[in-house]
Amino acid sequence: MKGFRVWPVLGFLAVLAVASACADTGDGSGETPSTEWGAADFNGDGSVRIAVVTEGSRDDGAYYQALVERVEEISAAEGYEAPLIVDQVAPADARAELNNVVAQGADIIAIGSSNLADGNEDLFLEHEEIFWYCNCGSGYQDTPGLLRSADSGAELGISAGYATGLLLDARDADLAVFLGCCDLNFEVESFLAFRLGLHLVDESFDAIYVPTGNFPFDFNNTAGATEAYNAAVAEGVAAVYPFLGGAHEPITRLANEDGLVVLTAGSSRGCEREDLDYDIEVMFDAGDFLTPIFDEIIAGTAEEGGARRFTVGVDPEVGANLCDGTADQDQALTDLNARIGAGQFEEEISRILAEAYGF
């Protein structure tokens, strides 16, 4: 067991920011020499390098990009080595890519999803000198040697569906499309919850799920997503949730051209974009998860092998947000999110999880 290994999720960021501040030259200046990295130099090679390994594209405009950009910001601000960014990794190649970044001297390895962590848990202990972090989601179990964050796809889906329903109602429309990959369990969870959120606004509202991938975990198939989008538009959808990676922004542009309601898929910066127009932010931004855990690490309240859970209606980092809602719409969504946070949909969420994961 290493020292400084007592934090969850965002632990690695706090370590990075604090380690440099705590190492002192001893001359009273309080400055940190470039070769003294303190706790952040986990492998003891005299430098600090963070690695990010994701199955999505580093510039997907959504979830994966948020994680990459935040790591790049931290590395630049603290004077660390340029981070190692390995994107578009297939689950079958995950072990090889994780070993590659280990060999390249990574001190901290951030894994973008549970799909890349599955089956590689032995590496976390084999290379215990490295700080391992994964934004693995609620379906991934606590794992020795790994710090993870977790949110609930069902909670997020209910919030996103409700927000979409509010905007459909204002347009006298009733149908949305959820563009995903290939009926993966977590997609089913999110979609079923999205439909429930729509029904909470009006029982007649509905959504259709359309797969766009050519193979499992193919969230980057722009051609397939475009074909699915056009078919959905022909059916009269008025809102699109592009639950995608590299194909997310191309579909958003099409939705903008057609004047449809469109949602982000993780990013909390959609409303401020100038090149794309979003109506709803569905926030589960991997970059945002880093900040709140910083305080928890400093306070010593995080524990290795566990998870920091982000709950809709409790933690501001997760949930749907209207970019330009009316006062009444904003309040209705705030009230709905509060109900989620208070546990008022636990029975519905249990049924959704049972259907999505077969338990």
Image: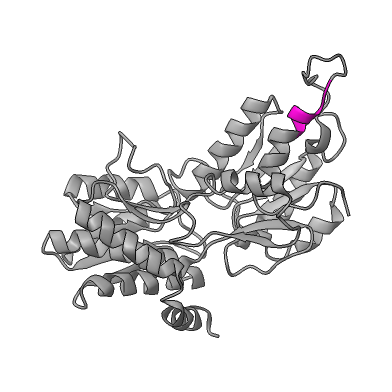
Residue 40 rendering spot, x and y as whole percentages: 78, 37
Image colouring:
one colour
Identify the residue shown where x is 17% and y is 67%: 235
Give the residue furthest to the left: 172
Residue 15: give x, y in percent of width and height.
Answer: 73, 40
Whether residue 211 is visible to the viewer of this picture, yes or no, is: no
- Residue at the spot 21% in from the left edge and 52% down from the top edge: 327
Q: Can you say whether 217 is above or below 294 in the image?
A: below
Residue 21 screen position, x and y as percent: 74, 28
Q: Which image quadrant is residue 175 in?
A: bottom left
Q: Which residues are magenta?
A: 19-24
Q: Residue at x 27, y 73 (%)?
A: 200
Instruction: Tell me if 31 is positioned left or right of 184 in this view.
Output: right
237 vs 107, nearest the viewer: 107
Left or right placement of residue 215 versus residue 229 in this view: right
Which residue: 74% across, 58% down? Answer: 303
Q: Which SS type dominates the magenta stretch?
A: helix
Q: Please provide percent x and percent y for residue 341.
A: 45, 66
Q: Which quarter of the picture shows residue 192?
A: bottom left
Check if residue 175 falls in the magenta segment.
no
Residue 20 falls within the magenta-colored stretch: yes
